[in-house]
Image (tube, rainbow, N blue to C red):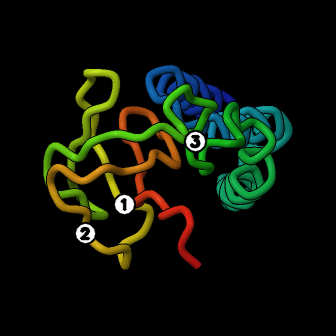
Amino acid sequence: MSAWLVFLIVAILFFIAEIYTPAMFFLNFALASVVCALLGIFTENYNVLVPIFTVLSILFILFLRPLLNINPKADKEHEFESQYIGKTATATTDINAFSGRLKVYDEDWEARTLSEDAPEIKKGAKVTITRHNDLTMFVQKPEKKGKK
């Protein structure tokens, strides 16, 4: 079988794999396979084509994948403006950095303290919502006014 045909079949298989995965990973191999299929028209030497495929795959992964990344802000925490930020709520369970519940506007929400070293907030305590991330409220004890 001709080298160009082998690499064309491999490219089609990688394109199909890319369709079923949202990672933009197999597309790099598919593009490297297409380039090798074009080069395979001129040479049948697999000792040349396989290293070219390997080098192109690595280069496409390193340089092309970041450009094709659909959601460049995926590593950032998903936060948004919320009507709850700054509001006072009541802890319905003990709240720490890993678990807790609170009630605000007669709604029950998952709650966490802002950091792992923050003191645990006891059940029934009033808390201030400082951050709202998806379905989790991040809280702290309200600052006492008038004391310095």
Tell which of 80 and 105 is nearer to you.
Answer: 105
- The residue indicated by pointer 2 is 120
- The residue indicated by pointer 1 is 113
Mark 3 vs mark 1: give the one in front: 1
- Cα–Cα span, label 3 and label 1: 37 Å
* Residue at 50 percent of width and 27 percent of height: 13
Which comes before the other along the chain, label 3 or label 1? 3
* Residue at 23 percent of width and 47 percent of height: 91
Q: Position of residue 112 (x, y in %)?
A: 33, 54
* Callout 3 secondary element: loop
Q: Position of residue 126 (x, y in %)?
A: 31, 50
Mark 3 vs mark 2: give the one in front: 2
Q: Residue furthest front?
A: 146
* Picture quarter with the N terminus: top right
- Cα–Cα span, label 1 and label 2: 8 Å
* Residue at 15 percent of width and 54 percent of height: 123
Q: Name the amino acid type tagged 3.
A: Phe
- Cα–Cα span, label 3 and label 2: 43 Å
Q: Are marks 3 and 1 in contact (CB under 8 Å)?
A: no
- Crowdedness near tag 3: few (<14), some (14–19) or many (≥20) residues, C-alpha within 10 Å: some
Q: Quadrant of residue 24?
A: top right
- The residue indicated by pointer 3 is 25
| In the image, residue 80 above or below residue 74 | above
Which comes before the other along the chain, label 3 or label 2? 3
Q: Are marks 1 and 2 in contact (CB under 8 Å)?
A: yes
* Residue at 36 percent of width and 60 percent of height: 113
Q: Residue 46 shows which numbered tag?
A: none
Tell which of 136 and 141 is nearer to you.
Answer: 141
Left or right position of 141 against 82: left
Q: Name the amino acid type tagged 1.
A: Thr
